């Protein structure tokens, strides 16, 4: 008896996005080449996704760049996907970067292990003392709009912004950054940047049980049944981990920095995850 038709996937990516220190296009060319083993795959730019999604069984959003560069098109895509009930990978219910950076303010207020974060001038007193502070747009990404401010200028800088439009954090003295990668809440691998000044020069990292407990706490908080999440953290001078970012929209995976065995296991798990979404 002949097999049924293969599921079709619209793979949303910006192959020309100029990421610093990374080549987004290489990763997505590799992933689509492997997904084609089980799915019929077509690639499109994020600005075209809303117009094209009707003809596919599912949409996979990958290295599509910061949404603020095409916010109107992204909003139209989300609205149409919800209206047509087209499965999206990751699902559009993410509470992390997918919904902006408000989660950092909320998690900080709830005393989760995150870098202390506020979003209005009236709350600056809640932040610990620091030699410098970081101000960045709440809807930003990839360090767009980030700037460092000295304490004596902080109130004026934040006061000049509309309330709730920016995030304010102390500039942390950290030993290194580390990223934990999950599919459907299952840990896949971890990478770290031993040299803070070279964020994307990554090496494999063997997490401790405590490290994984830290990362899983945020994955469980996000409550996504399907999809890829990257938990970015920094190791402070005191040895603690603090959340930097919970990337649940289009996390770069740095698959060129892992072993062949880890990469193959990731691809197999991703295929399983997409099939589960389609069910």
Image: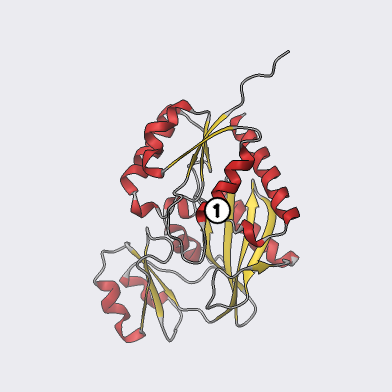
Residue most toward the top? Answer: 1
Query: Could you say whether the residue bearing mark 1 is in a helix, strand or loop?
Result: helix
**Quadrant including the N terminus:** top right
Q: Where is residue 266 in the image (x, y as percent from the top left)?
A: 68, 49
Q: Is residue 201 visible?
A: yes
> Which of these two is toward me, 262 or 71?
262
The answer to whether 94 appears left or right of 160 in the picture is right
Which coloring applies here? secondary structure
Q: Residue at x 46, y 50 (%)?
A: 15
**The quarter of the displayed image where residue 76 is located:** top left
146 above or below 1? below
Q: Can residue 225 be seen in this view?
A: no
173 above or below 140? below
Q: Name the residue under label 1.
A: 26
The answer to whether 94 appears left or right of 225 in the picture is left
Q: Where is residue 110 in the image (x, y as percent from the top left)?
A: 51, 63
**The quarter of the displayed image where residue 236 is located:** bottom right
Local crowd at mark 1 within 10 Å, few (<14), some, or many (≥20)?
A: few
Q: Where is residue 167 in the image (x, y as percent from the top left)?
A: 38, 67
The answer to whether 21 appears left or right of 203 in the picture is left
> Which of these two is toward me, 84 or 96?
84
How many labels sit on residues?
Answer: 1
**Quadrant including the C terminus:** top right
Q: Where is residue 137 in the image (x, y as percent from the top left)?
A: 35, 64
273 above or below 179? above
């Amino acid at each position: 008896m002949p097999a049924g038709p293969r599921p079709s996937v619209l793979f949303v990516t910006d192959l020309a996005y100029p990421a610093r220190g990374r080549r987004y296009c290489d990763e997505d060319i590799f992933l689509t080449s492997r997904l084609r083993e089980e799915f019929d795959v077509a690639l499109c730019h994020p600005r075209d996704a809303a117009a094209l999604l009707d003809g596919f069984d599912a949409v996979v959003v990958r290295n599509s760049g910061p949404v603020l560069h095409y916010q109107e098109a992204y909003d139209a895509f989300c609205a149409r996907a919800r209206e047509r009930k087209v499965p999206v990978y990751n699902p559009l219910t993410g509470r992390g970067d997918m919904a902006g950076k408000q989660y950092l303010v909320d998690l900080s207020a709830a005393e989760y292990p995150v870098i202390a974060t506020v979003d209005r001038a009236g709350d600056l007193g809640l932040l610990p003392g620091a030699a410098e502070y970081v101000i960045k747009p709440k809807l930003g990404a990839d360090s767009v709009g980030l700037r460092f401010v000295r304490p004596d200028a902080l109130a004026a800088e934040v006061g000049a912004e509309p309330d709730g439009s920016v995030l304010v954090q102390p500039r942390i003295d950290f030993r290194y950054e580390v990223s934990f990668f999950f599919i459907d809440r299952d840990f896949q691998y971890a990478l770290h940047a031993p040299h803070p000044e070279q964020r994307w020069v990554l090496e494999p990292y063997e997490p401790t049980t405590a490290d994984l407990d830290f990362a899983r706490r945020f994955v469980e908080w996000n409550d996504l049944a399907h999809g890829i999440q990257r938990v970015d953290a920094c190791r402070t001078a005191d040895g603690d981990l603090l959340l930097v970012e919970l990337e649940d929209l289009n996390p770069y995976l740095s698959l060129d920095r892992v072993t062949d065995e880890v990469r193959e296991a990731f691809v197999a798990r991703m295929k399983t995850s997409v099939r589960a979404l389609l069910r």
